[in-house]
Image (spheres, rainbow, N blue to C red):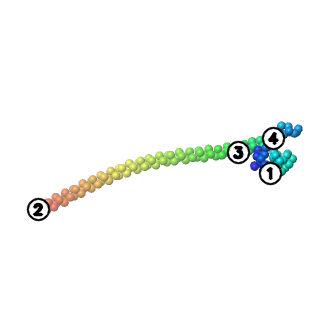
C-alpha cells in the first residue's frame, strides 16, 4: 500500500513534485513525478494525479468500512458493559440491604448481651444476698 495514493518521494529518494502535462495527448492533466525522470523511465516515479486520487478514495473507503465495523463492535461491547453495570448495581443494592439487615441484627444481639449482663449482675446480687442471709441466719440460730 506504500505506492498507493499521492506519492511524496521517488524510489531514488528525490522529493516528488506535482506538475501539469503540456502534451497534446494529455493537455492540462496533473501528474506527480521525480525531477530526474519522465513518463517512460521506470527508474523514477511518474504517476497521474487522477489515479492517485482514485487510490486515495479507495483507501479511505476501506478505512471507513473498517472503522464502521469497529464502531459496531464497540457498540456491542458498550452494551455488554452497560448490562454488567446494571447487574453489578443490583448486586450492590442487594449487598447493601443485607449489610443493613446484619447491622440491625448485630445491634439486637448487642442489646441482648447487655440485657444478659444486667440479668447476670442481678443474679449475682441475689445469690450474694441469699448467702449473706443464710450466714446471718446460721449465726443467729
* Distance Cα–Cα, label 2 vs label 1: 132 Å
* Distance Cα–Cα, label 3 vs label 1: 29 Å
Q: Residue furthest top?
A: 28
Q: Earlier in the sequence, mark 4 or mark 2?
A: 4
Please tell me whether mark 3 sits on a helix, a strand or a loop: helix
Where residue 5 appears, x then y in whole percent?
A: 76, 45
User: Measured along the vertical axis of the image, is residue 3 above or below residue 129?
Assistant: above
| Residue positioned 67% across, 44% down in the render | 67
Taking 76 as reference, is 132 left or right?
Answer: left
Question: Are the residues at dot 4 and dot 2 in contact (C-beta closer than 8 Å)?
Answer: no
Residue that carries the numbered disc 1 in the rendered image: 12
* Distance Cα–Cα, label 4 vs label 1: 19 Å
Query: Badge 4: how crowded within 10 Å, few (<14), some, or many (20+)?
Result: some
Where residue 129 appears, x then y in whole percent?
A: 19, 57
Where residue 76 appears, x then y in whole percent?
A: 61, 45
Q: Earlier in the sequence, mark 4 or mark 1?
A: 1
Q: Which mark is residue 63?
A: 3
* Distance Cα–Cα, label 2 vs label 3: 113 Å
Question: Are the residues at dot 4 and dot 1 in contact (C-beta closer than 8 Å)?
Answer: no
Callout in the foreground (3, 1):
1
Query: Badge 3: how crowded within 10 Å, few (<14), some, or many (20+)?
Result: few
Residue that carries the numbered disc 4 in the rendered image: 19
Q: Earlier in the sequence, mark 2 or mark 3?
A: 3
Q: Earlier in the sequence, mark 3 or mark 1?
A: 1
* Distance Cα–Cα, label 4 vs label 2: 138 Å
Q: Residue furthest right?
A: 24
Q: Which mark is residue 141?
A: 2
| Residue positioned 47% across, 46% down in the render | 93
Amino acid at each position: 500500500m506504500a505506492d498507493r495514493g499521492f506519492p511524496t518521494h521517488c524510489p531514488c529518494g528525490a522529493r516528488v513534485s506535482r506538475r501539469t502535462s503540456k502534451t497534446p495527448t494529455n493537455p492540462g492533466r496533473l501528474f506527480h513525478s521525480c525531477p530526474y525522470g519522465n513518463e517512460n523511465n521506470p527508474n523514477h516515479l511518474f504517476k497521474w494525479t487522477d489515479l492517485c486520487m482514485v487510490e486515495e478514495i479507495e483507501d479511505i473507503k476501506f478505512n471507513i468500512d473498517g472503522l464502521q465495523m469497529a464502531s459496531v463492535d464497540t457498540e456491542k461491547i458498550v452494551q455488554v458493559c452497560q448490562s454488567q453495570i446494571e447487574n453489578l448495581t443490583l448486586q450492590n443494592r442487594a449487598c447493601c440491604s443485607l449489610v443493613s439487615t446484619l447491622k440491625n441484627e448485630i445491634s439486637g444481639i448487642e442489646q441482648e448481651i447487655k440485657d444478659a449482663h444486667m440479668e447476670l449482675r442481678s443474679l449475682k446480687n441475689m445469690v450474694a444476698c441469699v448467702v449473706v442471709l443464710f450466714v446471718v441466719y446460721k449465726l443467729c440460730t
